[in-house]
Image (spheres, rainbow, N blue to C red):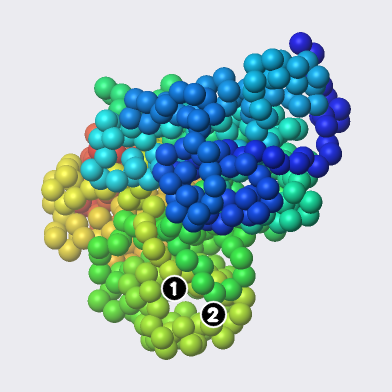
């Protein structure tokens, strides 16, 4: 049968005579039911929803009275009946449908109000089992939602308590629902069921016998969190999707921009690796740390991080792993800092930092590394997906490959440098000493060039490279990288290993008196 174009669908206001209400989340449902009753609408309902409405002395008809068939199978079957779905799907502007509905004694239902079993909330609980999850898969609800949304020209569909006031307002203007609202609600309904089905599919994907394997189907359904002013550049439209408010609270300053979100994401990922360390501060610019340091005092950590690169932090982002105190806040406040991120802020630090209205202040509510196990990136024709790089390494896992064994203090420097290099774009080189980055080289096509940039930055800031540890995100393919590091003053090296020329690199390190350890894993970041 040929479909009518949208412009040919009946677009006049829809008078509501009968409404079907069947909701899991009963917030606001009695207010809506009261408005419908006052508007002379016949209310049909099921189970707990009907009881809730009756408690307010609002007349309601059970679905079983309409269908002539009682609810059964412990409530699994309530609304799955031709009398119900015929009433929802019938096109009352199409005479053939009207004639058939009259023949079958099917009365139209002009408004459907349904929200679904709380599947996402259920599976998020630690004690959820597959049996419990399965019982929270709604069948009748999505079926009614999709039926009503498909027939939006003749039916209104509400899937969230947030829409009730909108509907009540429409009813007050003549007991009718406008076409534009019905079309909008239909769009919301299809997005709602898409998100619901994605959550179910992803849950079952993770129940596979081989959960470490990536699923055959990528299901991503995220609701818009907010529209952004623009993307990376002013000519690019942009929005952010998902549940960022679960992780951060941007409680002061302007709305975060597209670039701000990418910077904050990078900052949170790094500070996650230092969350249980001594007071740590990292300064970011364009998603790359330009200085990182740890110390017994947070203010000293800031000073050491800033000393790595005193030019780049202007307009940058600062993140710390401790409550931000006044002393540290005063030091940060001496330069223009666009965003400051911390688990909390002292009252005195807030009084100082909030004097600048455009500066964003962010509280960390939850770390992304606790929840994010997969990463996605759009490419031509689709997307890439990979397991998130959550790999960390301990002292016991390091493999010393040189004649000289690093001291405990040198191992501390090596592990610090390795934590940082993980968050530097490849090719990445980090020189570090005393829990402070001394030089950072990032994003170069040559590993030697990355090292040269790190050395040049350290010398520009007047920082000594003598006794430093050098970390490389991937193996040194030739001895020249290690030789350049030793010439600059490095005494220890941490790298993945795995090059066909490892023996040559180790031999060069031994000749230079370096201590070198292998991690066995790399940290490419493109």
Is 62 located above or below residue 405 in the figure? above
Counting residues from the start of the chain, the first of labels 2 and 1 encountered is 1
Q: Residue at x 71, y 19 (%)?
A: 102
Counting other residues with Cα less than 10 Å from the Cα at mark 2, is it few (<14), some (14-19), or many (20 or more)? few
Q: Which residue is drawn at 66% across and 44% down?
A: 41
Q: On residue 306, which mark appears?
A: 1
Is 300 located above or below residue 9 in the figure? below
**SS for callout 2:** loop
**SS for callout 1:** helix
Q: In which quarter of the image is the N terminus?
A: top right
Residue 22 on image: x %, y %: 50, 40
Is 519 located above or below residue 233 in the figure? above
Q: Quadrant of residue 136 in the image?
A: top left
Q: Is residue 375 left or right of residue 371?
A: right
Q: On residue 401, which mark appears?
A: none
Nearest the viewer among 288 and 260 is: 260
Residue that protrudes farthest toward the top in the picture: 1
Nearest the viewer among 101 and 207 is: 101
Are the residues tagged 2 and 1 within 8 Å (C-beta)? yes
Counting other residues with Cα less than 10 Å from the Cα at mark 1, is it few (<14), some (14-19), or many (20 or more)? many
Q: Which residue is drawn at 30% across and 62% down?
A: 275
What residue did someone put label 2 on?
335
Q: Residue at x 37, y 59 (%)?
A: 366
Nearest the viewer among 33 and 337 is: 33
Residue 98 on image: x %, y %: 75, 21
Residue 363 on image: x %, y %: 43, 69
How many discs appear? 2
């Amino acid at each position: 049968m040929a479909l009518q174009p949208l412009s040919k669908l009946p677009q006049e206001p829809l008078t509501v005579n009968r409404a079907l209400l069947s909701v899991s989340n009963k917030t606001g449902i009695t207010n809506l039911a009261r408005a419908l009753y006052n508007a002379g609408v016949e209310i049909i309902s099921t189970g707990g929803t009907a009881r809730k409405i009756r408690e307010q002395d609002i007349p309601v008809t059970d679905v079983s009275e309409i269908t002539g068939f009682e609810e059964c199978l412990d409530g699994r079957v309530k609304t799955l009946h031709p009398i119900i779905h015929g009433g929802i799907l019938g096109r009352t502007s199409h005479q053939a449908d009207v004639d058939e509905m009259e023949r079958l004694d099917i009365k139209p239902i002009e408004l459907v109000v349904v929200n679904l079993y709380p599947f996402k909330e259920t599976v998020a609980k630690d004690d959820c089992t597959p049996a419990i999850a399965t019982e929270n898969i709604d069948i009748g609800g999505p079926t009614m939602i999709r039926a009503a949304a498909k027939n939006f020209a003749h039916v209104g569909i509400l899937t969230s308590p947030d829409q009730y006031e909108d509907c009540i307002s429409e009813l007050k203007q003549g007991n009718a629902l406008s076409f534009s609202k019905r079309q909008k609600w239909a769009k919301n309904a299809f997005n709602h069921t898409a998100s619901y089905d994605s959550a179910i599919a992803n849950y079952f994907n993770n129940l596979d016998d081989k959960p470490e394997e990536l699923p055959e189907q990528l299901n991503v359904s995220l609701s818009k969190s907010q529209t952004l002013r623009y993307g990376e550049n002013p000519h690019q439209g942009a929005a952010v999707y998902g549940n960022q408010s679960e992780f951060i609270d941007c409680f002061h300053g302007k709305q975060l921009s597209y670039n701000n979100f990418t910077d904050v994401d990078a900052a949170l990922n790094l500070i996650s690796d230092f969350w249980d360390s001594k007071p740590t501060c990292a300064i970011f610019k364009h998603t790359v740390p330009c200085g990182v340091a740890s110390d017994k005092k947070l203010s000293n950590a800031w000073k050491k991080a800033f000393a790595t690169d005193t030019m780049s932090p202007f307009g940058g982002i600062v993140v710390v792993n401790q409550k931000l105190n006044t002393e540290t806040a005063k030091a940060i406040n001496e330069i223009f800092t666009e965003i400051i991120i911390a688990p909390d802020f002292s009252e005195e630090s807030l009084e100082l930092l909030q004097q600048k209205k455009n500066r964003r202040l962010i509280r960390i509510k939850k770390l992304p590394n606790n929840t994010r196990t997969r990463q996605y990136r759009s490419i031509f024709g689709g997307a890439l997906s990979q397991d998130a790089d959550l790999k960390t390494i301990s002292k016991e896992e390091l493999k010393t490959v040189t004649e000289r064994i690093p001291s405990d203090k040198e191992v501390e420097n090596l592990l610090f440098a390795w934590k940082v290099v993980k968050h530097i774009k490849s090719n990445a080189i980090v020189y570090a000493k005393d829990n402070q980055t001394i030089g950072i080289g990032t994003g170069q096509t040559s590993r030697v060039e990355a090292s040269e940039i790190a050395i040049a930055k350290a010398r520009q800031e007047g920082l000594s490279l003598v006794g430093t540890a050098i970390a490389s995100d991937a193996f040194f393919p030739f001895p020249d990288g290690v030789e350049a590091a030793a010439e600059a003053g490095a005494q220890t090296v941490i790298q993945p290993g795995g090059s066909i020329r490892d023996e040559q690199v180790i031999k060069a390190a031994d000749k230079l008196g370096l201590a070198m350890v292998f991690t066995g894993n790399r940290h490419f970041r493109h």
